[in-house]
Amino acid sequence: MGAHRELAISAMRAVSHQSIAKPDFMEKAHLALPGVTVPGSLPQTLRTEVGANELKLLADLVLIWSIGDYEGENDYSGYYDPERPWYNVFFGAYGIRSYKPDRLAWGYDKDGRPDFNEFLEIARIDYNNFTAGQFGCPPEKMSFKVRKLVKSRDNGWDLAKIHAFVPSGLHDPIYTLGQPGSYVVYGIPSVKLLEGREPYERLEMYGQMYMRQVPQHCIHKDVPQPITFAFGALCQDDKPGRKLLDEIMTALKDRYLTLIPES
């Protein structure tokens, strides 16, 4: 494999170890948040914490995620490659600490019912700003929008099956260089990948998001605020994309469904 792949793995490992050395709110709450990888993804996850001031929401966020692996000697992840099912895919989990009034958990109303529209504000910021935005995506192309959402329950979790439009992160780095550090993990896309395509093109994706409020008695007293845990992915809405989504969700559910105990 290429040198950039090894750099990406090392960087992800270093950032995650730094997070462990300086505990985030999930660790302070004594809630495990292990990483998950699948065949075809990078063999490493990255863990970061984002505060409410940066999110501009009444919530802090812990993210743990990965993307498609590098292929051959390519200097870029499958995240950029329109010919691979991994195009524009990242997957993983969120821990969300809420500062909403009346100690309401993020993504839930006062009666404890799931509010996926509120939860998906996190996903909107993630796709528009933290992902496409880091590569220089202009505001007018930050296209995250849910087209269809079907709610259900699965093993005590709230589940949303989602059709959504998202902005692609594929771009020409010569003209639209965003945050240089972002290329360490994702790699540098070849301009050939853009042939016949617009930078930051709007894509329709299909995915699943599982969400659950952590029972307060399970949270350590050092973190008194309510916490929501969620995991999932969005993939291309075609046969290869659906197959990849099944593989990702199987791995995520195997690791996370029993992570949060019943109330």
Image (cartoon, rainbow, N blue to C red):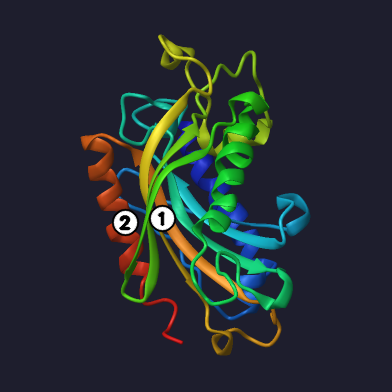
Locate residue 253, reporting x and y percent: 33, 65
Residue occupying the point 61% across, 36% down? 182
Q: Circle 2 sits in a helix, a strand or a loop, which is it?
A: helix
Q: Residue at x 74, y 58 (%)?
A: 52
Dot 2 amino acid type: Met
Residue type of the residue flagged with mark 1: Gly
Where residue 57 appears, x then y in whole percent?
Answer: 71, 56
Q: Which mark is residue 249?
A: 2
Single out the residue that lies furthest toward the top: 196
Examine the rendered structure and indicate whether residue 224 appears above or below residue 211: below
Q: Secondary structure at mark 1?
A: strand
Please say whether residue 190 is visible from this viewpoint: yes
Q: Quadrant of the N terminus?
A: top left
Instruction: Please tell me which of labels 2 and 1 falls first in the chain.
Output: 1
Name the image quarter holding residue 81. top left
Q: Residues within 10 Å of mark 1 (few under 14, many from 20)?
A: many
Looking at the image, can residue 46 be seen? no
Please give the name of the residue rendered at 60% of the width and 65% of the height, measured from the top-left corner. 96
Q: Position of residue 247 (x, y in %)?
A: 26, 51
Tell whether label 1 touches label 2 (CB within 8 Å).
yes
Along the line of sight, the residue nearer the viewer: 48 or 233: 233
Q: Is residue 138 above or below residue 48?
A: above
Q: Is residue 159 left or right of residue 15?
A: left
Q: Using the image, determine if residue 177 lies above or below residue 32.
A: above
- Compared across the picture, whether 82 is left or right of 23 comes to left
- Picture coordinates of residue 161 (x, y %)? 35, 53
Residue bearing the label numbered 1: 232
Identity of the residue furthest to the right in this view:
53
| Nearer to us in this view, 148 or 126 | 148
Residue drawn at (67%, 28%), measured in percent from left and top? Answer: 139
